[in-house]
Amino acid sequence: MSEGKLGVRIPWRTLSMVGSLVAIWIVFSITTDGTFVTSRNLTLLARQMSVTSILAIGMVMVIVAGQIDLSVGALAGLLGAASAITYVNLGWPLPAAFVVPIVLGAVLGFVQGTLVARLRIPPFIVTLGGMLIYQGAILGTTGGVSISPSRPYLFVGQAYVPHAFGWAIAGAISAFLVYRAVRASGTARGPWIGLAMLTLVFAGVMNDYQGVPFPVLLVLVLATAFSVLSKHTAFGRHLYAIGGNREAAFYSGININRHLVAVFTLMGVMSGIAGVVLTARVGSATSDAGRMMELDAIAAAVIGGTSLLGGQGTVWGALLGALVMASLDNGMSLMNTESFWQPIIKGVILVLAVGIDMASRKNRGH
């Protein structure tokens, strides 16, 4: 963020990301003869990025606090398997199958947070160990066999919101954004109006196919909740303070240990939600579910402007980063590009994003 000659704050990082996304979409639209920008493909793209988005939302909070969590992919896979076993093997009711993984995720996140905060074990070591433990637990729990829940369970990952309901939500969001535009002044009104129009376009594109996917609606609800938590509560502001300058945060009276335990617990909850959505979207819980998703979540957060040094990042930026990554995967798949190119290109983009962040911090004297 920098200021122009008129004193207007210009979000250059966000604008560059949006510009990059538009360029990616234009290229894939041309190279796939328009298939990439069809309503069907864009709807599937939105659903495809839902699990990574959920993990990235939680990851932003962790990284902002100056921490890292390498276990979220394996944990999501394990909790998705636990959910499927609860519903299929144990025959528990559907609500229990959704609550169990969230509670387990909170407990495991609390344990990891306690090890980091109380025993001073580096988060890299704690969560790397957690990743290995969870990967083994998935294999032991499933026995290497897929567990496939029945259709009532699958609505979380495969259902679509009715068209009328989708339009109603889009209209309400657009009305709120227009209200914010009216309350803003001068050039600050433009972005709010643009977001309101984009919301209606988004609903129109989704409804042109089968409607807004339920997991996408869930992502938007979670993103809104965590955005409010991070920007408009004392807890969120304290996380930014801890990540920005831990020593200053300590001397200002912030209970650092309590906040670190809480943020890892929240990450565990988000892993539980992601695990349920992943199992429902794929249609089964498998022994390799969630593998490498922690890297996708971290990459989405960093590409979206979250600094690995802590103290900087936004939830909505992480969603934009997740969209960039999902667009690359989807577009290259439509082009029948050899699969080895996907991680290479995403790795290059991740390194560039970190390099830009470090350069911008150096220019600001951080």
Image (tube, grey):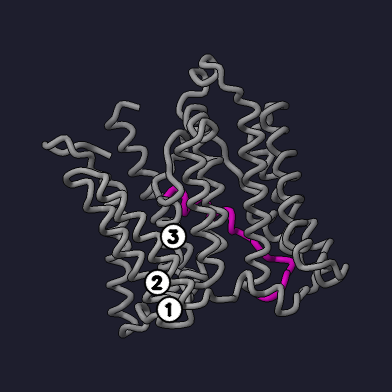
Q: Quadrant of the C terminus?
A: top left
**Label 2 residue SS:** helix
Q: Characterize the local packing of mark 1: few (<14), some (14-19) or many (20 or more) Cα atoms within 10 angstroms.
A: many
Give the residue at x 26% y 59%.
194
Residue 151 vs residue 31: left or right? right
Figure check: 250 above or below 366 = above
Mark 3 and mark 2 lie on one chain; the one further toward the N terminus is: 2
Distance CA(mark 3)–CA(mark 1):
30 Å
Locate residue 289: give its quadrant.
bottom right
Q: Mark 3 vs mark 1: give the one in front.
A: 1
Residue placed under numbered mark 1 in the picture: 207
Residue placed under numbered mark 2 in the picture: 203
Mark 3 and mark 1 lie on one chain; the one further toward the N terminus is: 1
- Which residue type carries mark 3? Lys
Q: Name the foreground residue: 197 vs 58.
A: 197
Instruction: Locate residue 178, reporting x and y percent.
Output: 29, 55
Locate residue 196: give its quadrant.
bottom left
Say the numbered circle drawn on residue 243. Answer: none
Residue placed under numbered mark 3 in the picture: 346
Q: Name the foreground residue: 112 vs 359.
A: 112
Q: Mark 3 vs mark 2: give the one in front.
A: 2
Distance CA(mark 2)–CA(mark 1):
6 Å
